[in-house]
Image: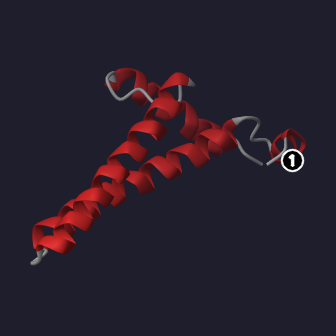
Amino acid sequence: MTGFFQDLMGMGGMTDQVVAMDFLIAAKTGVRNYAMALTETGTPEIKATLTKQLEEAIDLHEKISTYMIERGWYHPWNVNEQIQLDQQNIQTALDLP
Protein backbone atom coordinates (compact mmCIF):
# COMPACT_ATOMS: atom_id res chain seq x y z
CA MET A 1 0.00 0.00 0.00
CA THR A 2 1.44 3.38 -0.90
CA GLY A 3 2.10 6.04 1.72
CA PHE A 4 -0.66 8.20 0.28
CA PHE A 5 -3.33 5.55 0.79
CA GLN A 6 -1.99 4.61 4.23
CA ASP A 7 -2.19 8.24 5.33
CA LEU A 8 -5.62 8.60 3.77
CA MET A 9 -6.86 5.61 5.78
CA GLY A 10 -5.14 6.87 8.95
CA MET A 11 -2.81 3.90 9.20
CA GLY A 12 0.56 5.48 8.41
CA GLY A 13 3.32 2.85 8.48
CA MET A 14 1.27 0.40 10.47
CA THR A 15 0.23 -1.59 7.41
CA ASP A 16 3.68 -3.17 7.03
CA GLN A 17 3.64 -4.17 10.68
CA VAL A 18 0.15 -5.67 10.37
CA VAL A 19 1.10 -7.66 7.27
CA ALA A 20 4.32 -8.89 8.91
CA MET A 21 2.45 -10.01 12.05
CA ASP A 22 -0.12 -11.82 9.95
CA PHE A 23 2.69 -13.54 8.05
CA LEU A 24 4.40 -14.50 11.34
CA ILE A 25 1.19 -16.02 12.70
CA ALA A 26 0.74 -18.00 9.47
CA ALA A 27 4.34 -19.23 9.69
CA LYS A 28 3.80 -20.37 13.29
CA THR A 29 0.68 -22.21 12.22
CA GLY A 30 2.62 -23.90 9.43
CA VAL A 31 5.33 -25.08 11.85
CA ARG A 32 2.70 -26.46 14.19
CA ASN A 33 0.83 -28.24 11.39
CA TYR A 34 3.96 -29.80 9.88
CA ALA A 35 5.07 -31.02 13.32
CA MET A 36 1.66 -32.56 13.94
CA ALA A 37 1.56 -34.21 10.52
CA LEU A 38 5.08 -35.54 11.03
CA THR A 39 4.02 -37.42 14.16
CA GLU A 40 1.13 -39.01 12.26
CA THR A 41 2.95 -40.17 9.14
CA GLY A 42 3.46 -43.82 8.37
CA THR A 43 6.10 -44.02 5.66
CA PRO A 44 9.76 -42.97 5.60
CA GLU A 45 9.25 -41.07 2.32
CA ILE A 46 6.44 -38.94 3.69
CA LYS A 47 8.35 -38.44 6.94
CA ALA A 48 11.38 -37.17 5.01
CA THR A 49 9.23 -34.79 2.95
CA LEU A 50 7.44 -33.42 6.01
CA THR A 51 10.73 -33.05 7.89
CA LYS A 52 12.14 -30.96 5.03
CA GLN A 53 9.00 -28.83 4.90
CA LEU A 54 9.07 -28.38 8.69
CA GLU A 55 12.70 -27.19 8.54
CA GLU A 56 11.78 -24.72 5.78
CA ALA A 57 8.82 -23.45 7.81
CA ILE A 58 11.07 -22.95 10.85
CA ASP A 59 13.56 -21.03 8.70
CA LEU A 60 10.76 -18.83 7.34
CA HIS A 61 9.53 -18.13 10.88
CA GLU A 62 13.05 -17.10 11.88
CA LYS A 63 13.37 -14.73 8.92
CA ILE A 64 10.03 -13.07 9.63
CA SER A 65 10.80 -12.80 13.35
CA THR A 66 14.20 -11.25 12.67
CA TYR A 67 12.65 -8.77 10.23
CA MET A 68 10.08 -7.71 12.81
CA ILE A 69 12.57 -7.55 15.70
CA GLU A 70 14.91 -5.34 13.66
CA ARG A 71 12.05 -2.90 13.07
CA GLY A 72 10.87 -2.89 16.68
CA TRP A 73 7.57 -4.58 15.86
CA TYR A 74 8.15 -7.76 17.86
CA HIS A 75 9.73 -8.29 21.29
CA PRO A 76 9.69 -12.06 21.89
CA TRP A 77 12.18 -11.94 24.79
CA ASN A 78 10.61 -9.04 26.68
CA VAL A 79 7.00 -9.69 27.57
CA ASN A 80 6.46 -6.25 29.11
CA GLU A 81 7.68 -4.48 25.96
CA GLN A 82 5.53 -6.75 23.80
CA ILE A 83 2.45 -6.07 25.91
CA GLN A 84 3.08 -2.31 25.69
CA LEU A 85 3.49 -2.55 21.90
CA ASP A 86 0.32 -4.63 21.60
CA GLN A 87 -1.62 -2.08 23.64
CA GLN A 88 -0.34 0.75 21.42
CA ASN A 89 -1.40 -1.19 18.33
CA ILE A 90 -4.83 -1.85 19.80
CA GLN A 91 -5.29 1.84 20.54
CA THR A 92 -4.17 2.76 17.02
CA ALA A 93 -6.71 0.33 15.57
CA LEU A 94 -9.45 1.72 17.80
CA ASP A 95 -8.61 5.29 16.72
CA LEU A 96 -8.96 4.50 12.99
CA PRO A 97 -11.76 6.42 11.30
Residue of label 1? 5
Residue pictured at 41% horizontal, 28% vertical: 82
Residue pictured at 52% horizontal, 32% vertical: 67
Judge whether 39 appears above or below 6 on screen.
below
Residue 60, image x, y percentages: 42, 46
The outermost residue toward the front is 45
Q: Which one is nearer the viewer's eye here, 89 or 51?
A: 51
Judge whether 71 appears above or below 21 on screen.
above
Residue pictured at 11% horizontal, 66% vertical: 39
Q: Is residue 68 left or right of residue 42?
A: right
Q: Is residue 10 left or right of residue 78?
A: right
Q: How is the image coloured?
A: secondary structure
Q: Secondary structure at mark 1?
A: helix
Residue pictured at 35% horizontal, 60% vertical: 30
The outermost residue toward the bottom is 42
Residue 63, image x, y percentages: 46, 38
Q: Is residue 21 left or right of residue 33?
A: right
Q: Is residue 71 left or right of residue 5?
A: left
Residue 34, image x, y percentages: 26, 63
Tell me the quarter of the picture where residue 83 sits.
top left
How busy is the neighbourhood of tag 1: few (under 14 within 10 Å), some, or many (20 plus)? few
Q: Which one is nearer the viewer's eye here, 46 or 86?
A: 46
Q: Which one is nearer the viewer's eye here, 35 or 76?
A: 35
Q: Amino acid at mark 1?
A: Phe
Report the label total.
1
